[in-house]
Amino acid sequence: MDKRTEVEPAHRLESNVRSYVRSFPFLAKSASGSTIVAEDGAEYIDFLAGAGALNYGHNCKVIRNALIGYLSDDGIAHSLDFATVAKNRFIDTFDRLILQPRGMNFRFQFCGPTGTNAVEAAIKIARKVTGRRDILGFTHGFHGMTTGSLQLTDNPYYKEGLPDLEQQVYTPLPFCASAEEEEASIAAIAEILRNRSESGVAPAAIIVEPIQGEGGINVAPMSWLKALEDLCRQFGVLLIIDDIQMGCGRTGDFFSFEKAGISPDIVVLSKSIGGFGLPMALVLMKPEHDVWKPGQHNGTFRGNNLAFVAATVALEHFWSDFDFYDEVKAKADHIGERLGQLVARNTALELSYRGKGFVWGLESKSSAEVAGLIQKMSFERGLIIETCGRNDQVLKFLAPLTSTLKEIDQGFDIVSDVCALLNKQFAGADLEQKRAANG
């Protein structure tokens, strides 16, 4: 057996809840860029990127050096919500480089440093602004693991053994993942909102991921997002954009919804907003929705100054001009070409792909198990890549945006070799079935 898969290097005292270590049984020691090095010296290409928290790769040198300098100068690390030089610099830089060029005007709320806490804060804001209770999400949506966000997560696995959530009567709105579905989806949502409004139970808000990551890399058409915003305005419902995994450049633009031409009421960010894999979450709300009283939503670690420093350097280094945009687009086009080649060369697997920027999904019509097989066999050959979708039926490409073309090709070469092996197996099995059917 390959030494990479001999043991699960989990401590005997760690809870059963651990998950990634089960798919990737190795002991990580160091990392740089798109490569993770194990204790035994084995190297792995990282197409997982901290589930989207490492858009700029592992130990990005320019950010790392800034953090080392900040700590060496005894820069304040923990500050609750005190005013600090690091926080003020982040706010000014984000406003100058990201919001103002896009004509956006938002208030900043720093909450507990996780995506789910940002979603919880957004839920509260919507309820306080509208005086209404219900928040509506979408089929295949994923918004976090705390109670409010989990209610909006459309996967029963995460609700097992939780009576209040298992027994919850919740019908998600129909997500639209193609132009062909757009008209029917918008009509269905309009009917739901109309009936709710007439019955006096209009929702406070609708929350949506422009690209559903955990749900299977489902890409909403930009025209559908615009139509959804129009419905929200028509019925007085707030629109919350969950850009926790797909923001910070993952789709090619800083925000995943930019090309839709919409103006969300609330945007939630986390993961790569921290710049270096450091915990940070941010709620952006229109000024008129900032109805909080002091301390009504707080968190001990909302003042993570190391994340403020890293985030500011990331913005200045990668987003101060269009060079990074252009690099991401060129590499994204190359990823699309490699995926197209996989589909064309492995017809027995009946593959299809979807995505944009640096987030792509590969799915087999032949078997829902193909994605898991590719993941396992790729890991044995030195590639870390995960699956997504309700049945883990989609292989999820989520490499750092800073990955070089060489690193991208190395990863795709591994996937290509694995697909070729599986394609041969599936083609042989199909031939045997046909022979048996013909006697």
Image: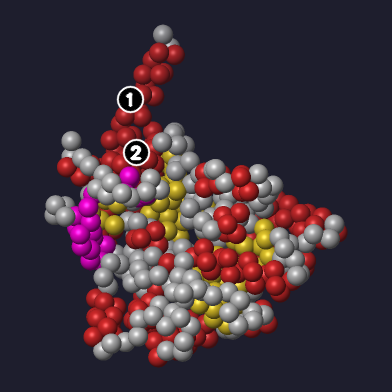
Which quarter of the figure has residue 307? bottom left
Alpha-carbon neighbours of circle 1 within 10 Å: few (<14), some, or many (≥20)? few
* Front residue of 352 and 285: 285
Magenta range is 18-38
Q: Front-most of 206 and 429?
A: 206
Mark 2, Cα crowd under 10 Å, few <14 / some 14-19 / many 20+, is: some
Residue 285: x and y in percent read 60, 77
Asked if residue 420 is positioned above or below residue 155 in the image, the reply reads above
Quarter in which the N terminus is drawn: top left
- Tell which tag, 2 or 1, sits nearer the viewer: 2
Which residue is the site of mark 2?
A: 373
Q: Give the SS element for disc 2.
A: helix
Q: Where is residue 281 in the image (x, y as percent from the top left)?
A: 47, 72
427 lies above or below 295: above
Secondary structure under badge 1? helix
Q: Residue furthest right?
A: 198
* Residue 158 x %, y %: 52, 47
Residue 337 visible to the viewer: no
Q: Name the residue under label 1.
A: 428
- Mark 1 is on which residue type? Gly
Q: Which residue is rendered at x = 20% and y = 45% of the image?
A: 4
Q: Determine if residue 32 is in view.
A: yes
Residue 272 on image: x %, y %: 40, 69
Does residue 215 show up magenta in the picture? no
Q: Which of marks 2 and 1 is nearer the N terminus?
A: 2
Q: Residue furthest left?
A: 41
The residue sitting at the front extreme is 13
Q: In which quarter of the image is residue 279?
A: bottom left
Q: In which quarter of the image is the C terminus?
A: top left
Q: What residue type is labelled 2?
A: Leu
Rounded to the nearest angstrom, the CA distance separating label 2 from label 1 is 17 Å
